[in-house]
Image (cartoon, rainbow, N blue to C red):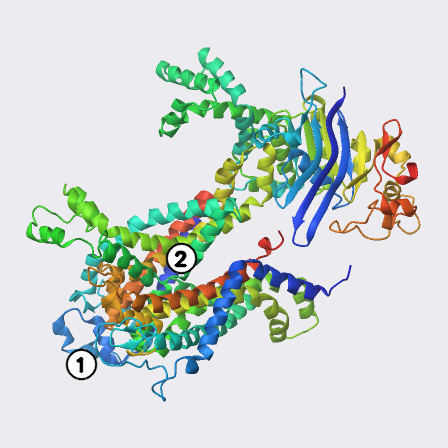
Amino acid sequence: MRTYILRRLFFLTFVLLGVSVIMFSLLMTFSPERRAMVYVTTPQQAKDIPSLIKRYGFDQPFYKQYGRWAKEVASGNFGYSLVASRPVSEAFWIYFPVSLELALYAAPCIIIFGIWMGTRAGRHRNSGFDHFSRVFSIIGWSLPTFLFALVLLMVFYGYTNWFPPGILSDESSLYIIEHPEKFVRYTGLYSIDGILNGNLSIALDSLRHLVLPVITLTVVVCAILMRVMRSGMIEEMSKDYVTTARAKGVDENTILIKHARRNALIPVITVAGTLVALLMEGSVAVEIIFNRQGIGWWLATSAIQLDMPVLMAICLFMGVVFVSVNLIVDILYAVIDPRIRLD
Amino acid sequence: MNKLLEIKDLVTNFYTYEGVVKAINQVSLEIEKDIVFGLVGESGCGKSVTARSVMRIIQPPGVIEGGEIHFYNDKNDGEKSVDLLQQDEQFMQKLRGSSISMIFQEPNLALNPVLSIGYQIAESFLFHQKQNMSQAVLKDLQNNEYRILPLLRGFLIWCYAKSLEADKSGSLNLINKIPLLKNWDYLLHAEAKKRSLVILEKLGIANVERIFDAYPHNLSGGMKQRIVIALALACHPVLLIADEATSNLDVTVQAQILELLIELKKDTISSIILITHDLGIVAETCDRAGVMYAGNVCEVADVNELFNNPRHPYTKALLNSVPKFTQKDKLETIPGFVPNLVTPPSGCRFHPRCPECFDLCKTRTPVLQDIKQRHQVACHLYD
Amino acid sequence: MATQHPALKEFKYTLHRIFKNPTAILGFTLLLFFITVAVMAPYLAPPKYEHNPYKVPHTGFSSIPQPPSAEHPFGTTSGQYDIYYAAVWGTRTSFKIGLFVVSIALLIGVTLGTIAGYYGGLVDEAIMRCVDAFYAIPFLVLAMTIVVAFGRGLDVIMIAIASVAWRNYVRVMRASILTIRDLDYVNAAKLMGVSDFRIMIRHILPNSIFPVMVVASMEIGAYVLIAAFLAFLGLGAPRGYADWGQMIALARNYIVGPPDDPFLYWYTIAIPGGCIVLFVLAWNLIGDALRDAFDPKLRRE
């Protein structure tokens, strides 16, 4: 088991390396002036491009430039973000908690809802529920995330004003600014910070602003999860060991949950990486539409301004997330499927 | 009264895209107690479908459409029977695995790869012998077995007594939801494990403790088939159906498994239905045999009688086609092909290939009739 | 009973499997509808600017959208761009995007996948590691990065999406090839001395292309969605181009109308949005039906 994990770790470092190479190759397509912007960390440095070009040696061969860039990245220097008006590495910690909060609430909804729906649909194939779930899945997959978010906003904010966009209401934001001693920023997640500070109204306000974004993400990601779960269940229910269990007198429900579902979860875990990627993609649209300043919002806003350093940094970050998710997935495999453990 | 299972005019159809497959066409069989009954026939003749219809594990698009299946298992009154086709699913679930068990052809796929062997065997006990085991555990608890604190003992006694009283108890449901307390049935699991180890030993498996914790992929094919048999015999069924249970095994392992089955029949099971296409196995291990062709039973007789005095043309042809050691010329075959069961031949389904076919055969389906004591044939030659 | 040629019978059975789903029929109908609109675009919405039919005519510069009227059947959006015109010519844009991306991606993906699958060993490892690096970043994010690297524009979007989309086909093709490569008839051809290239083209490719086609049909929808979002952000064609995503971007400030009538400007979002959803739905339904039809496990009921 230990060698298995070590092997996966080794492989995944390779992937990170590959990602950095891709990013750097994109960078190399620019003119030297544009490239210099990647190394800038203060507005003053931005004014002195020619000396930067000389200092960083943009006339040197590819691998030397890559080495220099990799060194910068390794020491935490990712350049300067126009949107945030501060270095990328600093700006990251402002935006990351917002996205984390969204993901934290969306993930359990997605998992519970998707697995439940998929199991139920796979059990009664071609029943009313199955057809409904397939319709749900197809429409969820065909909807542009940003359009769905817009429509939700239109109905549940424009028409009814139940769930406004943004992270906090104006009152809450003002309160936090005016009373810094009463509201300490422990984690950056307002729903949790609110509770930690004993301020329930802020926590609830934050949750209220989370409802629509979480619903949007859940619908979009569940569409896929549910479908994979369903096809997994259908396949498992037609396998021989299910017949054996039936012949033993086990009731259908137990067969479904204790026997078939465990096996059906294996292909679901396989697509866990894809689902996380979908979550990250979806949060770009969700954060822009609902005006939540998270990593996705940062990405899109920087893209509109053609701010390359930010995009590269975010790509690297997402590469790291992907690699971590894959590692967790590999460990989960070993936990669920005893056949893998002997590796 | 010696009957154990009586199948009368069973009809099972499969509704597929290509049409309705009339897999079983009014099959009638009688299985007595304490015998090994062989069900022979080519692939696709309906032997498996018959067996699964008896167990009622036919999945859609298959539907059992007619007939009666009488199961004589009443210990008090040997005459009384239940019609299995009239019972509800709950009754059948209690029956499967405890009164009638079935083992299948492919041992490599028959076990759930993500659950341990022990879990899968214990599951049978937990499903069928829960009352029994609860009583045993309760008695042990009351006799001060197990080294546990008095408080815990009291609590456990209360739990087990409660579970014996009513099927669905509100308070037990509540306890089952509380994290630590819901493990009150760990003693049940221990008892199930004990019984599983017993049955595993009975099957001649060594290192039962290790096997209990192992997973299916750790074992060989023959070993897996033994586990499958252990699963089937765990709760002492009265009838065991072996659906081509040895077809996928090496010949030596095949012999071992068959011997094991006969051995176990002596003290645990009453009768075995052995479904196979191998006439050699029938000759060696069965007492009585039935021959099926294209969803019909052609001939039923005691094995000696069947092999020495076959009456039905199909049986005769089948026995002829077995290569003999002294044979010097061409191998015998049956001309033609197995019919398409969506559009089966009219009348007797064997008539297109029968060397003794005449006009009546093409229009009327023959019915099983006695031509001798304990020898029945479905053929117009013997009307 | 008449015996049909087995290939014909299988083909008819496959058609039956595809159309057994009422959704497949819906999908094909929708697609047919969109194809008709795209082909008939010059007649349905005569272009105002002869040299560039994709430029949406705008009568005036007012930023307040106007509701549907006789002159503008679907109304106008912010900047007085005619929504009907944009919807019709946007169909052509979407087809352009979808088909371009899928062809380039298939070309690259299938070639690389075949090479990796057939030759195996070091070549296989090298190619698959490259693909893994491309997989590490979400589709949208990588496409966005490429667009930002090369500047705005519709063609940049198409190239960017194609540059990411090929990654899926390599894997599917390779898996397909691995299954077929060791089958006996391929070994037989090798023994007969047939060249590698011929084997790949004549034996392996025709049999392994089906899963790839299924994946492709399912993915076209995703490409159009991503292109729409990128256009919505403003990374696509210049303002006033006939593109559904752009139309929604123009309506950004008018999602919610005045307090007494919040749905006042519904048509600015509903119509281009509806076009996107239906278009992507059509491709997804077809892809779904194809997948169900070709999945061997679901084949024989």
> Residue B57 at what x, y percent from top left?
62, 37
- Determine the secondary structure under disc 1: helix
Mark nearest the camera among 1 and 2 is 2
Left or right: where A54 falls relative to A278: left
> Residue A250 at what x, y percent from top left?
55, 33
Chain ID at mark 2: A
The circle on residue A140 is: 2
Tell me if residue A192 can be seen: yes
Q: Earlier in the sequence, mark 1 or mark 2?
A: 1
The circle on residue A50 is: 1
- Determine the secondary structure under disc 2: helix
Choose top left, top right, bottom left or bottom right for residue A140: bottom left
Q: In the picture shown, does residue B83 fall above or below A252?
A: above
Left or right: where C12 falls relative to B1: left
The amino acid marked with disc number 1 is: Pro
- The answer for how far apart the CA atoms under marks 1 and 2 are is 51 Å
Q: Quadrant of the C terminus of chain B?
A: top right
